[in-house]
């Protein structure tokens, strides 16, 4: 067994589980945080990604729950995460480290079936890992009881604020007992997070094993200047010429991720996209194929910057720089984990220089620039002229000189009697509004600001009109038109 982990005060069962996973020396964040948590103190902890902060709160949490008999069955520890992938990763760590303890866990997040999760909650697990949106769905359906929570963990709390979860977090906090232990763990801490911590934590222990928003020293960073229109060609060139077998590529938008994955596939490079609009099944399959090596490139949005735990990931590529500098640190933190070195490359076009300046200001240093031969900025060839067959056919009159207008003969003025009036336009019901998007990702849930959000239409709500006959409103019959005297009372319609 590892004497180093035992010296932190962990029990033999936990030290045994850690040793079975091949860990012998605790990381700095574990050394600093575990004793405080075992002592029952609130903790505000920050560390670089990939430094073992999940084990830093999981191990002491398991020991505290196992050491005390609550006298009731139910959730005693609640761990909130911003994304599905991170929730699944944390829940797996809880099960792995607690394999020799008689504690049950449950996992709830959006994008998958509700009933299986409700059945898992009926088994009264002691530990629940959840995303805020789906957790509140279970609260609304009364399938979860949070009245006996003893320990609350907010993992990647700054990311939850970035994604608009602050209102959901406050709703969850209102459901918890006032007397509990609170733990905030994150790779970075913004001023907003510190403000939240001041109102949530009681005399917390501050643990900061690295400067705020610092990048890992195990990640070699490099910038390739390139024109915007040649980024895809350069990416394909780097993957092929370097024989990269596992590459995580980041884009700013979901549409951009889909398009890039499709284009790489046409170039003969196996790729798939992962983002919030993908179903959970598609995301799980793509991630599993990427981890196993079946998939060469995984294209992701910043959603995947948190929670993707890929062992020995060698390459991360910023196809587009993020517009939030802190997101750059999270992206490149997917490589260079657990003591293994990695490489982070950014393809930077001239229109992204302002983003780059903000990132380097955050890092407090310049990132190395390397121009790839053949992809020098400003050397992009203009698009080839379209073939004659591809150009739209021009109409003959476009080549003729404009002809003078011929005078039109004057028409005889006739009174607009009933028989000359055009028929009134038929009444048509208004086109239906578009239905709200179904299946919205709980990770992107935003609080509604519309007091009448239950009505998809933005206009006033009116009662349904009278039944229509023959597709026309009977109340409008005859309006704007006059029935000739010869047709009155015959039952025939005018015209």
Image (cartoon, rainbow, N blue to C red):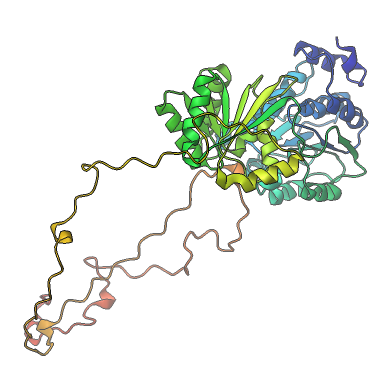
In the displayed structure, does residue 120 sit left or right of residue 463?
A: right
The answer to whether one can see residue 150 in this image is no
Q: Position of residue 355 (x, y in %)?
A: 64, 46
Question: How many numbered marks are there?
Answer: 0
In the image, residue 62 sits, relative to residue 348, either above or below, namely above
Based on the displayed image, in which of its 4 quarters is residue 179 positioned? top right
Point 63% across, 31% down: residue: 85
In the image, residue 48 sits, relative to residue 466, either above or below, namely above
| Most foreground residue, 392 or 173 | 392
Point 28% across, 42% down: residue: 386
Q: Position of residue 66 (x, y in %)?
A: 84, 24
Q: Position of residue 303 (x, y in %)?
A: 61, 38
Q: Position of residue 134 (x, y in %)?
A: 63, 41
Image quadrant holding the N terminus, namely top right
In the displayed structure, does residue 183 sit left or right of residue 419?
A: right
Based on the displayed image, in which of its 4 quarters is residue 78 positioned? top right
Q: Residue furthest top?
A: 1
In the image, residue 93 sits, relative to residue 207, either above or below, namely above
| Most foreground residue, 451 or 279 | 279
Image quadrant holding the C terminus, namely bottom left
The answer to whether one can see residue 71 in this image is yes
In the image, residue 126 sits, relative to residue 229, either above or below, namely above
In the displayed structure, does residue 138 sit left or right of residue 392?
A: right
Point 77% across, 40% down: residue: 364
In the displayed structure, does residue 298 sit left or right of residue 24?
A: left
| Most foreground residue, 208 or 136 | 208
């Amino acid at each position: 067994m590892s004497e180093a982990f035992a010296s932190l005060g962990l029990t033999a069962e936990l030290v045994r589980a850690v040793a079975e996973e091949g860990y012998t020396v605790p990381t700095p964040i574990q050394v600093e945080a575990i004793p405080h948590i075992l002592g029952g103190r609130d903790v505000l902890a920050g560390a670089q990604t990939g430094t073992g902060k999940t084990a830093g709160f999981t191990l002491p949490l398991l020991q505290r729950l196992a050491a005390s008999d609550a006298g009731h069955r139910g959730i005693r520890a609640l761990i909130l995460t911003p994304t599905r992938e991170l929730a699944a990763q944390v829940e797996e760590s809880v099960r792995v480290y607690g394999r020799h303890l008689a504690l049950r866990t449950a996992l709830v997040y959006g994008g998958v079936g509700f009933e299986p999760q409700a059945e898992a909650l009926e088994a009264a697990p002691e530990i629940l890992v959840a995303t805020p949106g789906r957790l509140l769905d279970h609260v609304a359906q009364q399938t979860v009881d949070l009245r006996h929570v003893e320990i609350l963990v907010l993992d990647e709390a700054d990311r939850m604020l970035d994604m608009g979860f602050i209102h959901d977090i406050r709703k969850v906090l209102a459901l918890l007992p006032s007397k509990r232990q609170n733990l905030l763990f994150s790779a970075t801490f913004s001023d907003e997070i510190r403000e939240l911590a001041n109102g949530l934590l009681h005399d917390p222990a501050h643990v900061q094993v690295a400067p705020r928003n610092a990048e890992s020293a195990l990640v070699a960073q490099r910038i390739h200047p390139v024109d915007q229109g040649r980024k895809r060609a350069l990416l394909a060139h780097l993957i092929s010429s370097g024989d990269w077998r596992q590459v995580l590529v980041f884009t700013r938008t979901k549409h951009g991720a889909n398009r890039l994955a499709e284009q790489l596939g046409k170039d003969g490079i196996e790729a798939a996209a992962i983002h919030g609009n993908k179903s959970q099944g598609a995301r799980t399959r793509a991630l599993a194929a990427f981890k196993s090596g079946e998939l060469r490139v995984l294209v992701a949005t910043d959603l995947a910057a948190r929670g993707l735990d890929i062992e020995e990931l060698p390459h991360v590529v910023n196809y587009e720089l993020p517009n939030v500098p802190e997101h750059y640190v999270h992206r490149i933190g997917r490589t260079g984990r657990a003591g293994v070195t990695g490489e982070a490359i950014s393809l930077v076009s001239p229109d992204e220089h302002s983003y780059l300046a903000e990132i380097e200001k955050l890092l407090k240093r310049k990132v190395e620039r390397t121009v790839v031969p053949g992809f020098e900025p400003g050397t992009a060839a203009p698009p080839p002229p379209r073939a004659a067959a591809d150009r739209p056919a021009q109409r003959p009159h476009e080549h003729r000189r404009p002809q003078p207008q011929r005078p039109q003969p004057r028409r005889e003025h006739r009174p607009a009697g009933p028989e000359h009036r055009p028929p009134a336009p038929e009444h048509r019901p208004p086109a239906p509004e578009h239905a709200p998007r179904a299946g919205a990702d709980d990770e992107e849930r935003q609080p509604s600001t519309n007091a009448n959000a239950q009505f998809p239409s933005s206009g006033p709500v009116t009662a349904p009109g009278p039944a229509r006959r023959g597709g026309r409103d009977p109340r409008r019959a005859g309006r704007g038109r006059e029935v000739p005297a010869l047709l009155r009372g015959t039952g025939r319609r005018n015209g």
